[in-house]
Amino acid sequence: MAKKDPYAALRYKEFNLFILVRFALVFAWSMQFIIIEWQVYALTKDPLYIGLIGLMEIIPALGMALFAGHIVDQKEKRNLLALCIALFSIISFGLFWITSPSVFETWSTKQILYCIYALVFFGGLLRSFFGPTIFSLVALIVPKKIYPNAATWNSSTWQMARVLGVTFAGFSIGWLGENEQMGVHWSLCIVFGLVMFSLIMLYQIKRKPILNPNIGEPVVKSLKEGVSFVFKTKAILGALTLDMISVLFGGAIALAAVFATDILKVGPEGFGILVAAPNIGSFLTMLVTAYIPIVKKAGIKLLVAVFGFGLSIIAFGLSTVFWLSVAALFFSGVFDGVSMVIRQTILQLKTPDHMRGRVSSVNSMFVGSSNELGAFESGLTAKLMGTVTAVVFGGTMTLITVITTGLVSPSFRKLDLTKDLEEHEKED
């Protein structure tokens, strides 16, 4: 195997443009989601309403996921992503308008909430297209032999944008405008600007060929092929299932606004630090993985990472000290970063080019949508059990999942991607 180059993907101009576009998008989306959570809790003082944000996004995301994957595999990826970003700008501008003083002075709280949830629902529809399109586009920008390195930098960019996005959102709410409401309003204006910037930069990337040999294939047949491939490929199925359960039950960060306001009492600035902590941990970990290979013994590494994630979530739930809570969330991000890079590498190495959209859509159903469903689960269990008990319960379920997976699937424990990478190097 060739000597590992930690900067291999960054030596391609279009990949650099791609991660710049992704950085702007994720920064904007992360800001927007955190600001919405803060706004909804400020209006209702009820964690269940925070959970409903996730539910409003997951319903359309799940409902459209497989169809979106079929469309992505049939269409040119650059222009399809541009269309998604253009539609996302409508959502971001709508939220900016809804939080304006004129609306708050004339609309009822219920009307404002309905509009926020409606725009989040529309965002869920777009979400089902974003993931498969981005996953497919990056595979057309870099050669197969550096997919693992591209996955590392792609995930690192995602995490860095999340870190800065959620942190800036927390602070901007308190800093922009003469009060927190105006801070929310002008923060959403920044989100809109970032979305437009990403759209402009995307057009610096050339259009890409459509590699699917079955253009015009019936939708039902296409969807069956994609789902069948995932369920027959044990490495992909195991990685997706493990991450789905851990994200579903370990979504404690969705309750960060409750912890910041009612338990730790640290205000919007502390809220920003809490939501940033896991993303900082993930980002730093992903930078390290650019230098340290993760393809060897990938299965056992993934199991250990998710187990560590569960322990960190339990520690966060039990903590009443702000900086201890920050540390717990930081380490949850460290372990989640390892998990994310391994999962993305498995998907890139095991998925044929003509099926990337559909496989990524199944991935979004398993893992991506689990973030929103996990947010709803956290809000619901917090309502039923209490906030602390809900978080500890989620972490415990994650640990049980890891132990069960390790016991019932010895083939997954032995998963190693070294041969897959060597085969791709020969192809290139």
Image (tube, rainbow, N blue to C red):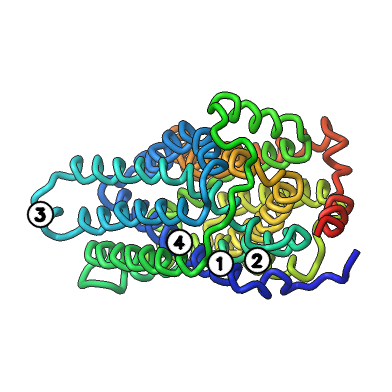
Q: Earlier in the sequence, mark 2 or mark 3?
A: 3
Q: How far across and how far down the image is residue 186, in percent?
A: 26, 67
Q: Which residue is mark 3?
A: 105
Q: Earlier in the sequence, mark 4 or mark 2?
A: 4
Q: Earlier in the sequence, mark 1 or mark 2?
A: 1
Q: Given contact means CB atoms under 8 Å apart, are the residues at marks 1 and 2 in contact?
A: yes
Kindly identify which numbered label has been placed on residue 25. Answer: 4
Residue positioned 88% across, 43% down in the render = 414
CA gap between label 4 and label 1 equals: 10 Å
Element at label 2:
helix
Element at label 4:
helix
Q: Earlier in the sequence, mark 3 or mark 4?
A: 4
Q: Which residue is mark 2?
A: 153
Q: Which residue is mark 1?
A: 19
Say left or right for 231 vs 57: right
Q: Quadrant of residue 197?
A: bottom left
CA gap between label 4 and label 2 equals: 16 Å
Q: Quadrant of residue 332?
A: bottom right
Out of 188 and 9, give the one closest to the viewer. 9
Out of 39 and 204, give the one closest to the viewer. 204
In this rendering, which labeled residue sits more in front, label 2 or label 3?
Answer: 2
Q: Is the N terminus in the top left, top right, bottom left or bottom right quadrant?
A: bottom right
